Image (tube, helix red, strand yellow):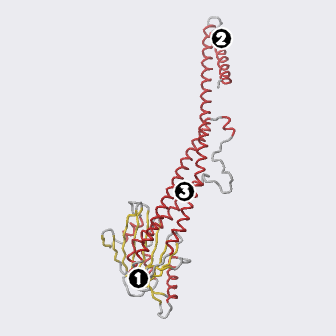
Amino acid sequence: MVHLIYPHLFCFSYHRSPDAIPPSWTDWKQTHPDHATHAQSYEYAGQDWDAIFEVKSLGDSQGLLLYGAVREEEKPQSIEVLAQLKQHFSGIQGSIGQTWLVLSRWQPDHPGEGDRQGLDQAFQDIAKLWTIESWGNEEKFLGNVLRSAVLPNGEWLWVCLAEDSQTMEAVSNFYYDLQRLFYYQHKIRWSHEQSCKIKEILSQETFFPLTHEIIPASQIKLTEATALKGDFYELRQVLYDNMQKLDRHTRGLEGLSLQLQTLKTNLRAYEKRSQRIEQRCANYPFQTDIQHWSDFAGNQAVYYQEQIQQDIESLSPGLRVREQHIKTLQVLVAAAQGERDRNIENLVGGAGLGIGVSSAAAGAWAGHTSGPWQTFSVSLALGLLFGVGSYLLLRRYRT
C-alpha cells in the first residue's frame, strides 16, 4: 500500500453561460457556509480539510476552480483521505465538462520497496476511486510523474505524483494556466458533441445522403399525378412543408459552421496555452515532457475538425438540391394558381352571360305566356344553357 502526503484534489468545472452560475456550484457554496471571502475566492475551513472556491469568466462560459487539501502537510495518510476529498466535491457539474487533478507526494508503505513498484501501486489505488480501466502514457510535469485518463462520462482525470515538496509546490504556479488549457480542451470536445447533435437532428429528415447511394434520393416526394393535375392546394402544402425544411436545413448548416469556427478558435488557443506552459516550465530545473498536449491538438482535435468539415460538405449539396426543388415547386404552384384563376374567370364569364340571357328572355317572354312560372322556367333554362355552354367554350379555347 502507498501513502499520500499532503494530497490535493482539484475540480476544474466549466459551464457555458456568461452570467448565471450553475445550480450545482451554488449548492456547494450553500452547503459550506463557513467560508471567508477574499476577492473572487471563497476559502472554506473544514474540520480536517480546507478548500478554495473560485469562479472565473471565460468568454461565453464560466470556469470553476475548486480544490481541497488535508491540513496535515507532513503526515502520511492512506488513499482513503483522497476518497474523502472526492466525496466532498460530489455533485459538481458543468455543461461543457470537468477535469479532475490529483496532486500529492507519495511514499510506499514499506521504505524498502522499490520506487517503481510503489509508484505503480499509487496509480492503481487512485484508479479504483474513479473506476479507471487503464491510464495513458506516463509523462513528466516539473519533475513529477503525470498520468491521465478519460472517465466514462467524458470527464478527464490527471494525477500528478511528486517525490518531494519542492516539485509539488512548483505545480502551484500553473493552476490558472491549467484552468485555461483544460477549458479549451473541453470546449473543443463540446463543439464536436454539439455538431453530432445537429447532424442527428438533420439526419432524421434525410438531409444527409446515404453512403450507399450513387445518386442521392430526391428530397421532395412529388408524384406525376400531382404535377399533371395541378392541384393547387396540394402543391402549395408541399411547397410550404419544404420551405420549412429548408429553413431547418439552412440553420443546421449554419450551426455546423458555427461549431467548426468555435473548435478552430479554441484549438488555436489550446496550442498557444500549451506552448506557454512549456516555455514557463523551461525556467524550472525540473524535467517536463508532456506529449499528450501536442497529441490532442494534432490528432484528436484535428479529427473533430475534419469530421465537422466533412458533415458540412455532405450537407451543402442537399441544401442546393432542396433550393432547386423549391424553385420548381414555386413554378408549379404559380401555374396551378394561374389555372385556377382562369377557371374562376371562365366561370364568372359563363355566369354573367347566362344571367344576361335569362334576363333578356324573361323580358321578351313577359306577357306572352300563360303565367309567370312559365316565363321564369323558360328564362332560367335559356340562361343555364347559354351560361354552361359559354363556360365550356371558354375553358376549351381560352389559354
**Residue at left 45%, top 88%?**
107
Q: Which mark is residue 247?
A: none
Asked whether the beta carbons under mark 2 and mark 1 sit within 8 Å of each other, the answer is no
334 relative to 301, above or below: above
Type of residue at label 3?
Ile
Secondary element at tag 1:
loop
Reading the image, the residue beneath label 3 is: 198
Q: Earlier in the sequence, mark 3 or mark 2?
A: 3
Residue 91 spot, x, y in % from top left: 45, 70
Task: Assess disc 2: are there few (<14), some (14-19) or many (≥20) residues with their C-alpha within 10 Å of its C-alpha.
Answer: some
Cα distance, mark 3 to mark 2? 75 Å
Q: Nearer the viewer, residue 236 or 115?
A: 115
Cα distance, mark 1 to mark 3? 48 Å
Q: Among all residues in the image, which is located at the extreme bottom?
A: 112
**Which quarter of the figure is the C terminus placed in?**
top right
Horizontal relation, residue 133 to residue 226: left or right: left
Q: Nearer the viewer, mark 1 or mark 3?
A: 1
Reading the image, the residue beneath label 2 is: 374
Q: Nearer the viewer, residue 204 or 268?
A: 268
